[in-house]
Every structure is written in C-alpha cells, then in structure tokens.
C-alpha cells in the first residue's frame, strides 16, 4: 500500500492530507455497538497507519497544507467529544506507536458530565423493561416517540439507531430534557464516568497530544443563531485555554456535516474571527492545497481487513 499512497499523495504542492476521525476506543468489544473501535482493533489500525503514512500533529499538517510543504503520504489523527477511554485506552496505544493525535473536547461534559446520546444509549442498554413507553415525548420534527419493544441486544440496537436519529436535531435544551425523560421512563440511572476529567485532558497535553475545542454542549450549530453558535465555540475554547494555560487553535464542528450540522457560509467565518488556526469537519475527503483550512475533511474506513482498509483510504485521496 505504501507505494500507492506515495503515488497518490506526493510531497509538496501536490500533496493530499488524510485526517482520520475516531470517537471512542473501548477496552473490549461492545455487543450493542459491534462496529465501535476497541483496543485490539485500534492497535492494529495504528500499526497500518504508521507503516503507510507520515503522521503529523494536526496544527502542523494544516500549516504545511497551506504553504505547500506537506511530506508525501501526509496524515493526521483526531478524536471528538472527550470520552474518558481516549485517555485510558487510546493514549497508551498512541504512545506505544509514537503517533501524535488531536483531541476535540466538548467542555460541558468534563468532570462527570454525559453527552445526550450516552444518556439515551445507557437507558436502552440498562433498562429491564421489555417495552419502552415514550408516548408524550416528541422528536426533532414534533412527532411522538411512541412505544418500542426492546427484546435482545439486536433489537435494542435497532431501537437506539431510530431514537438517536429522531432526537439528534432537537435544540440543546429540549434534547437534554428529552433524553433525561427517556432515562426516567426506562428507570435507569446513567453513569457519570464516561467523559474525561480536566486532569485527564491536561495529561493528554503533557503526553504531547493536541487539544482542540468542540463547543460546550455539542449542539447542531446550524440550528442556532450566529451569536449563540459563536458563544458555544468561544466558551469551549476559553475553558480549555484556562485549563491548559495556552492557546487552543483547533476546532471541530459537532457532528460536522457541511450544510446539515454547520453552515459553510457562516460558521467557518465565526471560527476564523475567534482566532482559531484551523477547523475540521466530517466530510469524507482528503485536503488539497488551496482548500479552506477551516473545513478540513476527515474520514476513517470501517473495513476490518488491512487491504480493504488501505484501499478505501486510497480512494479517499481522489475525493
């Protein structure tokens, strides 16, 4: 694979930048989410990436993308949200392979907080009720959430997929109220140790990793007015800068799909005006010189085999 990546992503002005995105690295496989990356798989992926690419810190990669000095086969690694397993499981593996990585932190969930989707996930995972009655609760389109038979793990996986999509695009406060109501209906007390502490974020930085902002409450920025979006972005940066005692120059758009989750003609300008150096989306592609460094795309193949994983990454360089 290395000669193919060398051909597709040469050094200099013609270089391409592949940025891989992750969210969690579980200690062991999760039957409810069998496609989620676990420690053994992440270790394997890092080995492949290290053998194929020149992995750079993301801020350096963004600068070199702009000035046309990227090395051949340039890549960067990133994590979104701020899960505790990023520190506990992913960091030791990154250190073993000697690879840098950027971690984008939604600051409102530090020190015992919990993202809305995890409240929903744990409610469905842990409830002993065979039927989850959500009548009277509404989704993002104002439709009743209804009743859901849970059954076995496969059945719960289906219900979760449906509910996450229906609740995702509610505004932040109604979304939080909705998932808390779902947990109450499920009679589940969700865990409070899923996200990192401030101390763990500092430990990542001391280990040489980069820290970036990811808003406070992980809202869909496209659903907010410009002033509130700017406040979410700026406050997350300010919390991290106070925590680390240094500038935080990288930002990741929550969910990150252009036109759906953030507005390309609005939010990159806000991020630039707030003094960030670069920002990342979740559009599938590789970056080229001259493209907007405030909308750097990211992608990670889902294939489990080395060859298919590598070929899909190579295909990404054509986008």
Image (spheres, rainbow, N blue to C red):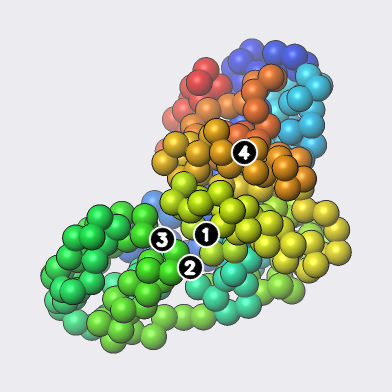
Q: Quadrant of the N terminus?
A: top right
Q: How crowded is mark 4: few (under 14 residues within 10 Å), some or many (20 or more)?
A: many
Q: How far apart are marks 4 and 3 (CA)?
A: 21 Å
Q: Mark 3 points at which residue?
A: 171
Q: How far apart are marks 1 and 4 (CA)?
A: 16 Å
Q: What element carries label 3?
A: loop
Q: Name the residue under label 1.
A: 218
Kindly check if marks 2 and 1 are in contact, taking CB atoms under 8 A apart as contact.
Answer: yes
Q: Distance between the residues labelled 3 and 1?
A: 10 Å
State left or right for residue 134 relative to residue 43.
Answer: left
| Residue depicted at x 36% and y 55% | 169
Give the image location of residue 70, x and y in percent: 77, 24
In the image, 206 versus 13, the foreground residue is: 13
| Residue depicted at x 54% and y 64% | 217
First in sequence: mark 2 vs mark 3: 2
Q: Mark 2 points at which residue?
A: 115
Kindly check if marks 1 and 4 are in contact, taking CB atoms under 8 A apart as contact.
Answer: no
């Amino acid at each position: 694979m290395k000669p193919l990546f060398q051909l597709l992503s040469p050094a200099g002005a013609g270089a391409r930048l592949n940025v891989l995105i992750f969210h969690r690295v579980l200690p062991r496989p999760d039957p409810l989410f069998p496609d989620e990356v676990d420690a053994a798989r992440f270790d394997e992926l890092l080995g492949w990436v290290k053998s194929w690419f020149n992995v750079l810190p993301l801020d350096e990669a963004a600068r070199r993308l702009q000035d046309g000095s990227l090395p051949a086969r340039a890549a960067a690694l990133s994590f979104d949200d701020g899960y505790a397993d990023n520190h506990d499981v992913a960091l030791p593996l990154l250190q073993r392979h000697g690879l840098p990585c950027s971690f984008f932190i939604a600051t409102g969930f530090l020190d015992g907080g919990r993202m809305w989707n995890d409240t929903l996930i744990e409610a469905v995972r842990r409830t002993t009720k065979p039927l989850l009655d959500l009548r009277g609760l509404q989704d993002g389109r104002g439709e009743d959430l209804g009743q859901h038979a849970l059954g076995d793990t496969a059945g719960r996986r289906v219900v979760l997929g449906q509910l996450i999509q229906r609740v995702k695009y509610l505004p932040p406060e109604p979304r939080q109220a909705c998932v808390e109501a779902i947990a109450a209906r499920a009679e589940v007390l969700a865990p409070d140790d899923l996200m990192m502490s401030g101390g763990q974020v500092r430990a990542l930085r001391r280990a040489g990793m980069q820290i970036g902002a990811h808003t406070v409450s992980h809202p869909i920025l496209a659903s907010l007015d410009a002033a509130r979006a700017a406040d979410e972005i700026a406050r997350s940066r300010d919390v991290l800068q106070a925590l680390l005692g240094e500038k935080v120059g990288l930002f990741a758009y929550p969910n990150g799909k252009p036109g759906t989750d953030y507005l390309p003609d609005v939010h990159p300008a806000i991020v630039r005006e707030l003094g960030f150096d670069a920002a990342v989306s979740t559009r599938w592609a590789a970056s080229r010189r001259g493209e907007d460094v405030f909308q750097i795309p990211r992608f990670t193949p889902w294939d489990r085999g080395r060859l298919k994983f590598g070929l899909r990454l190579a295909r990404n360089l054509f986008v």
